[in-house]
Amino acid sequence: MTKFLTFGETMGQYNAEFVGVYGAEGSYLLDCAGAESNVAVGLQTLGLPDVEAVWISRLGDDEAGQFVLDELKQRITVRARKHRGEKTGISYLNHHEDGEHFKTYFRKESAASRLTFADVEPHLRGADILHVTGITPALSNSCHNAIIDSLAFARANSIPVSFDLNYREQLWAPPEAARVFERMVRSTDIFKLGHDEAEAIWRKGWTAEEYARNFQDMNAGLVVVTRGMEGAVAFDGMNLLRHEGFRIQVVDPVGAGDAFVAGLLGGILELTPLKRLLSMDARERASILAHALKVANVCGALTCTRRGDTAAMPSMKEVQAFLNANE
């Protein structure tokens, strides 16, 4: 059994079923919104045998907290309690005429912002993969420390770490984010970021390939840089791989990055344990990474064709059917 472990904030998200700015009017689809739980759900939805996805958090004793519990417990292993007197974060997702989307958050001082390493540490023992994002350390000092301490624990206990940048400009400015992210990268084995995110934070004017090489110098592992509809590149120090992505009719792009990460990890786990991937011969690894990159791009693309963060993730059967029809 492969134990995938992650932690962070999941909010109740109201996803607008209309085009226009945020407002009380109109119809909204209620869903769970959390980058970490999205990846956990996505990995479980792929349907790989012998994979257990575990998500750790804190929730408020409120309607949103109960909704998140009810939704996620059906799909993954949940290690999160409701805390009396605390609240669960809420977000509203609205879609504009030009295809862009805008989020309105009500998450300040949420229950999840009080996460500590003590909440995470008991579950780290026996984990085969730790997945983190760049959202959690921005939520509070205790969340920042939980990330740093978890990364140190993983390194000391040889637990492979996956890190998805997930930069949120509403939470912090580029200089502060860059300092924390660069520290995190050095403690991770797989680092995924968007080319647009890299430019928003580091502003080097580099290509996706140049960013991949730069960060691979930091983590000496695998770096994947996504390029939206143009696919992604991956670099492991020896192999530089590219996938051009797929052309689809976009309905809702939210959650595509999380689906991509779930697909990347799932594509690897289909063929080999993550720990073995990182130590194998470069030529053998290239074949596995090419497969994983293809699966990741399909997952990201298919998620864009449906509404909802966790509701949109495809199964591995759907991934294969898409490939059969598009290759």
Image (cartoon, helix red, strand yellow):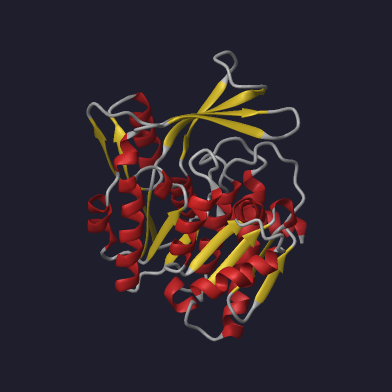
Q: Position of residue 152 (x, y in %)?
A: 32, 66
Which residue is nearer to you in this view: 59 or 246? 59
Q: Position of residue 280 (x, y in %)?
A: 50, 83
Which residue is nearer to you in this view: 54 or 182? 182
Q: Residue at x 48, y 46 (%)?
A: 35
Q: Is residue 77 left or right of residue 161?
A: left
Which residue is nearer to you in this view: 66 or 213? 213
Q: Residue furthest front?
A: 175
Q: Residue at x 61, y 35 (%)?
A: 307
Q: Point out the image quarter for the C terminus.
A: bottom right
Asked if 237 appears above or below 140 in the picture, the reply is: below
Can residue 78 be seen at all in this image of the molecule? no
Asked if 56 appears above or below 183 in the picture, the reply is: above
Can residue 5 be seen at all in this image of the molecule? yes
Q: Residue at x 71, y 58 (%)?
A: 231
Q: Point out the image quarter for the N terminus.
A: bottom left
Q: Is residue 84 left or right of residue 248?
A: left
- Counting labels gives 0
Q: Position of residue 125 (x, y in %)?
A: 26, 64
Q: Residue furthest top?
A: 25
Q: Position of residue 84 (x, y in %)?
A: 22, 28
Name the image quarter holding residue 237: bottom right
